[in-house]
Image (cartoon, rainbow, N blue to C red):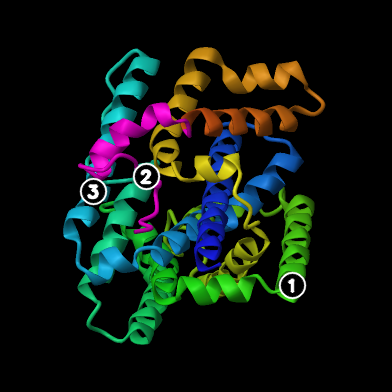
């Protein structure tokens, strides 16, 4: 029975990882449309409110062994991932544009920032293991709130994004997986979670167009000063932390504990994250992907974008890509479990 419960728990988290990875790809596809429909704007708002914090939370949830044992060799692998993503992006962008693409290492505004922030989250958490978790969490949240009042944090080491999103990773690190799994499996919690997500999705679809100006805030790209939020920016960020944490728990609760093909794809989200955006960029620049999809079904092209994002996510989840990332992230192992350290 215990072995069966363990397998169910693994399936649950892999299912969640695949769902989140699909939302990442879908969100990036929406971002490449110059004038998205009202529906897509609402879906973009829904996705970008929680998808990165949720990924970091789950990463923190399964970071305990690596962090507590100070496995800096594994932590360093996320820096190697960052270097690969920068290299791959540079090559693909240069080929797509037909000219050399320049970038500044460790000065991040594009997708490699996530690998860099993930490396920093692991590193900082490992360095602070001797401190009381509640104190570190409170300090991380306060820093995430007040860092926005700086005039300019800059893009070096994805600083603004690290300070903003680190509390989600650390919260995951603090919470025992077993207790969270049991609590979110309760029927009343599942019903409330499903209802909450439906209501939030409805709000996003209704007010998505009017809230499009919150893009920089949700991406943690700029300070309050640059977003003209000096008066209420800290309050907005505090409310954001509460709302997103609640949405993450809701997502975990409604994720099924059933092992299926999605579970196996969810074990390889790392490779999808590393590869998908440069490929989307090349398809956009060289093949006019967005324009072609819209032209195929002008009235309801949202469905085509959703299907295309799913197909790309599935293709990049195949085992054919896994050996390289195994070599990059876990030398000596046959296969990795994805972007999360679940050992």
List the residue tagged with mark 3: 77
Of marks 1 and 2, the one in the foreground: 1
Q: Which residues are magenta?
A: 317-343
Task: Pick whichever of labels 3 and 1 is earlier in the sequence.
Answer: 3
Task: Pick whichever of labels 1 and 2 is earlier in the sequence.
Answer: 2
Name the residue at 30% across, 66% down: 65
| Magenta segment includes 336 | yes
Task: Classify mark 2: helix, strand or loop.
Answer: loop
Residue 202, compared with residue 290, is above or below; it is below
Of marks 3 and 1, the one in the foreground: 1
Query: Residue 109 — which label?
Result: 2
| Disc 1 packing (10 Å; few <14; some 14–19; many ≥20) | few
Name the residue at 75% across, 71% down: 192
* Foreground residue among 106 and 274: 274
| Disc 2 packing (10 Å; few <14; some 14–19; many ≥20) | some
Left or right of residue 158: residue 8: right
Q: Quadrant of the C terminus?
A: bottom left
Q: Position of residue 271 (x, y in %)?
A: 40, 37
List the residue tagged with mark 1: 187
| Magenta segment includes 236 | no
Left or right of residue 42: residue 118: left
* Residue 63: quadrant of the picture: bottom left
* Foreground residue among 163 and 195: 195
Q: Position of residue 98 (x, y in %)?
A: 34, 12
| Disc 3 packing (10 Å; few <14; some 14–19; many ≥20) | some
């Amino acid at each position: 029975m215990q072995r069966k419960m363990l397998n169910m728990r693994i399936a649950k988290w892999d299912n969640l990882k695949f769902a989140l990875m699909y939302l990442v790809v879908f969100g990036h596809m929406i971002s490449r449309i110059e004038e998205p429909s009202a529906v897509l704007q609402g879906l973009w708002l829904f996705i970008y409110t929680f998808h990165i914090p949720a990924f970091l939370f789950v990463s923190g949830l399964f970071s305990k062994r690596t962090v507590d044992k100070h496995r800096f060799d594994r932590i360093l692998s996320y820096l190697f991932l960052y270097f690969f993503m920068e290299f791959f992006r540079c090559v693909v962008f240069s080929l797509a544009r037909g000219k050399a693409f320049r970038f500044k290492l460790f000065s991040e505004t594009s997708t490699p920032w996530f690998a860099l922030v993930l490396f920093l989250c692991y590193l900082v958490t490992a360095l602070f293991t001797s401190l009381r978790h509640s104190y570190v969490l409170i300090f991380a949240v306060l820093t995430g709130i007040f860092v926005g009042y700086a005039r300019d944090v800059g893009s070096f080491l994805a600083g603004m994004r690290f300070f903003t999103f680190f509390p989600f990773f650390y919260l995951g690190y603090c919470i025992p997986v077993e207790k969270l799994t049991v609590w979110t499996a309760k029927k009343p919690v599942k019903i409330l979670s499903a209802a909450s997500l439906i209501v939030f999705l409805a709000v996003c679809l209704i007010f998505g167009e009017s809230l499009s100006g919150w893009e920089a805030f949700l991406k943690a790209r700029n300070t309050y000063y640059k977003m003209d939020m000096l008066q209420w920016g800290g309050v907005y960020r505090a409310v954001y932390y509460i709302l997103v944490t609640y949405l993450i728990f809701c997502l975990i609760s409604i994720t099924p504990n059933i092992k299926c093909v999605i579970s196996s794809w969810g074990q390889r989200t790392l490779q999808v994250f590393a590869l998908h955006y440069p490929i989307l960029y090349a398809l956009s620049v060289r093949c006019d992907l967005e324009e072609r999809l819209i032209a195929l079904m002008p009235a309801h092209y949202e469905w085509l974008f959703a299907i295309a994002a799913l197909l790309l996510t599935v293709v990049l989840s195949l085992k054919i890509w896994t050996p390289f990332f195994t070599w990059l992230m876990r030398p000596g192992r046959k296969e990795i479990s994805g972007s999360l350290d679940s050992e």
